[in-house]
Structure formats: structure tokens, C-alpha cells
Image: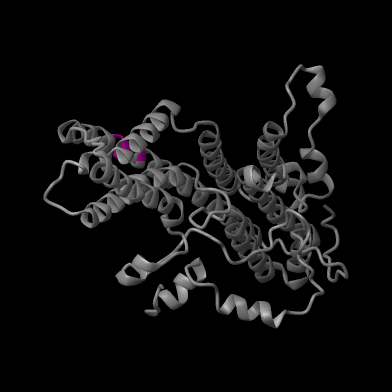
Amino acid sequence: ADFSKPATMCSTSNTNKPGSISSRTPHGPVFYDPENRFGILFQCHGSIWPKVLKYCIANTLFVVLLKFLRDSYGVDLECSALGHTFAGMVVSFLLVARLNSGLTRYNECRSNISIMFREARELVQKALVFSRKTKNSDQSAKEWRSEVAYRSLLLLRTTVATIDYPTKHIPAYNVPELSGVELTAVQPNKEFLRHAHIPYGIVTESIRVPIRMAQLLRETLCSQGERLAHPLSANEELNLLASIDHFQSGFYGMRKFMTTPIPFPLVQMAHTLVMVYVFTLPLVFLGDSSSNMWEDCITVFLLTFGFVGLDATSVELDDPFGDDANDFDVGAYAQYAVDDIIIMINDADGVEWADSLRYKMHADVSEPVDEDESAGLLNPPKHSFLWRMGSYQSGAAAV
């Protein structure tokens, strides 16, 4: 990337290039109004109903079939209620364990993401404050600050690409925001990998890109002694380097998440026992002479929704990344960090340097403001983050 001249205009739009971050309206997770109970009951967006409804209907029809066989042909398949009660205790324990492990992973992932987004912003902000405090306002200082901002955003961008690879299938070394020295530095060196007998793989090489970007960013920070007219103090430089350390701790936490799934035996046992327990419920209700068929159908329907729904919820919690309504849209949230850092550069060094950074992050600085897009930002879709911060807090309904 050439930081010697700020880019002021660009005639070619880069916003829609494959893999670029362009969305400012995250698709998930789903926000809601906890006080609107009826709205929660009938909300379809992000609901577990579409995944479990087929099981509820199938089990209810199974109740009708069993009643019909017993009443019409004398085929009685009733099973012991006592054994089913003990089985229910085991199934409930497994479901609770699955949900707890899934929720723990979900919260850990959100914590790691928060650390990375926070440190990207903090690093650039501290670099701006420390360098401007000592009156570094010449061209070389602005180039250094712009390079810090650009490489910080690339570190965040390549990390997001690594997380999103299972759904987006774009390796971190192919994201369109990479250019110049940074693009060359993160490309896999296949010749050396063959020489060193290191296995080559798209996923493994993609995971290595944020590590290389962190090294480039550290080199930029350590170069301030030669590039700034009034270098930063040792404590200030260490403070900046510490932000990269914190960012990388979040990244390594995400690596641990991506390489360590929930133990398969626990998942298999939970799935198996839930399905067996749920689809033998109708056999138990055959022995209930105190209720009619309609009551049994409703009870089995609700019990099926409860057990299968909890099992399906635990599966969603296991992997909170992707395109589902309840997944973290890390790409869209990364765009907020890009916007924040561009605003910081504008406040510190002016609009030309901010536009230079925007262009490197694939925004067309010559494109006029789209009034329709602006209206969409001011009136975001329901159940989104922006909707929660606006209409939800002002008491809007969540239906």
C-alpha cells in the first residue's frame, strides 16, 4: 500500500467486490423486546419453530395412529410409564449439559470478538493521540498513522475472513482489501512449504494470515522511532504493542473454538436419547385412560417441542457463526470498526487521509451519497442491532 499520497478521488466503485465488507445491517443475532410477551410468542424471525415443527406434527400423528390401531384392531403397544420417567431424567440431564456447554461456547466467542473489535479501535486511537501529543504533524507522521490504521483494519479483516471461511469460502489471504506489501506478505509460500515438508491447506494457510498481519503491524509500530520527527516514549510504544497482544489473545481464543468442537459422544448420546424418548411418548400415553385423544395430542405436541427444541437450540449455540438469524454477523460488525477508525483518521489528519483509508478498504470515495441507502440506515430492519438501539428502546412492538 502506498501511503506517500492520500487518495482523493476514485472513479471505480469497489463496494460490491466479492468478499469485501459492505453491509452495515447485521443479520444477527436477533434482538427482541422482553416485555412484549405476545410478540415473542408469535415472532417467526430467529424462532426454533421451523426446525422442530415437523417433529411435533409427526409425533402427534403417531399418537393418532396408535389410538386408531388399538381401538380398531386391538393392537396395543403401550409401554411402562415408570421406565419412561427414569429415561426422562437422563434425557433432561443430558439436555441441560448440552445447553450449558453450548451457551458457554457462545459467550466465549462473543467475548473474543469483543476483545478484537475493541483493541483494533483502541490501537488506532492511542497511536493517533500519542503521535499528535508530541506535535508530529508532518507528511511522514501522517503516513505512519495511516499505515497503523490500515494494517489494524487488515488484521481485523483477515481475522473475520478466517472466522467466516466455512460459510463465505474466501481465504484470508484473498480478501479484496489486501494490497501492496500486505498482499505479498500474507500469500502462502508454497515453495518453502514444500522445502520444509509443511503440509499446505487453504484453511491452515488462512488461519496463519492474522499472525502475519500482526507481525507487520508490530513492525509498523516499532518503526516510529525512525519515521516520526518526535518519537514516542518507550512506555507509549509498549502500550501500543500491548493492544496487539490483547487482540491476538482474542484471535487465539477463536482458533481454539474453531479447532475444538463439543465432544462427539455427548452430542450423539443427546441426539439419540432425545429422539428415542420423544417418539416413545405416544406409547406411554396409550395407558392414560383419564384423558381423551385430543388432550394426548396436545401434550405430546408440546413435549416434543420442548425436548427437540432444546436439542436444536444447543446445536445453534455450538456454532454461532454463519448466515442463520441467530448467528453473529462478524462481517457487518467489523464494518462498524472500519467506520469508527476512518472517523478517527478524519478527525486527526483530515478528509483526504480518511478518503485514502476508505479507498483502501474498498469504498468509492467519489460516489455520491445514496439517499435510499441512507434511509435504510436510519430505518433499519426489525430485530437488528440498529433497530434495538432505536425503535426498541423507544417502546416499539417486536412482532
Q: Residue at x 51, y 53 (%)?
A: 327
- Name, please, the residue furthest toward the left: 290
Q: Position of residue 95 (x, y in %)?
A: 32, 39
On screen, residue 240 above or below 340:
above
**Image position of 353 (left or right of 328):** right
Quadrant of the image occupied by residue 362: bottom right
Q: Nearer the viewer, residue 105 or 10?
A: 105
Residue under the point 21% across and 42% down: 286
Q: Residue at x 66, y 47 (%)?
A: 161
Q: What is the number of callouts on the image? A: 0
Q: Is residue 97 magenta?
A: yes
Q: Which colour scheme appears in the figure?
A: one colour
Q: Position of residue 371 (x, y in %)?
A: 69, 83
Image position of 339 with respect to 77: above or below:
below
Q: Main secondary structure of the magenta part?
A: helix
Compared with 370, 236 (above or below) is above
Q: In the rendered view, does 53 fall on the left or right side of 320? A: left
Quadrant location of residue 8?
bottom right
Residues 89 and 353: in front is 89
Figure check: 22 above or below 95: below
Residue 28 counted in the magenta span: no
The image position of residue 275, as x and y in percent, is: 36, 37
Q: Position of residue 18 (x, y in %)?
A: 76, 55
Quadrant holding the C terminus: bottom left
Depth check, front residue: 274 or 322: 274
State the residue at coordinates (34%, 34%).
Answer: 276
Most distant residue in the front direction:
73
- Report the magenta residues as a range: 94-98
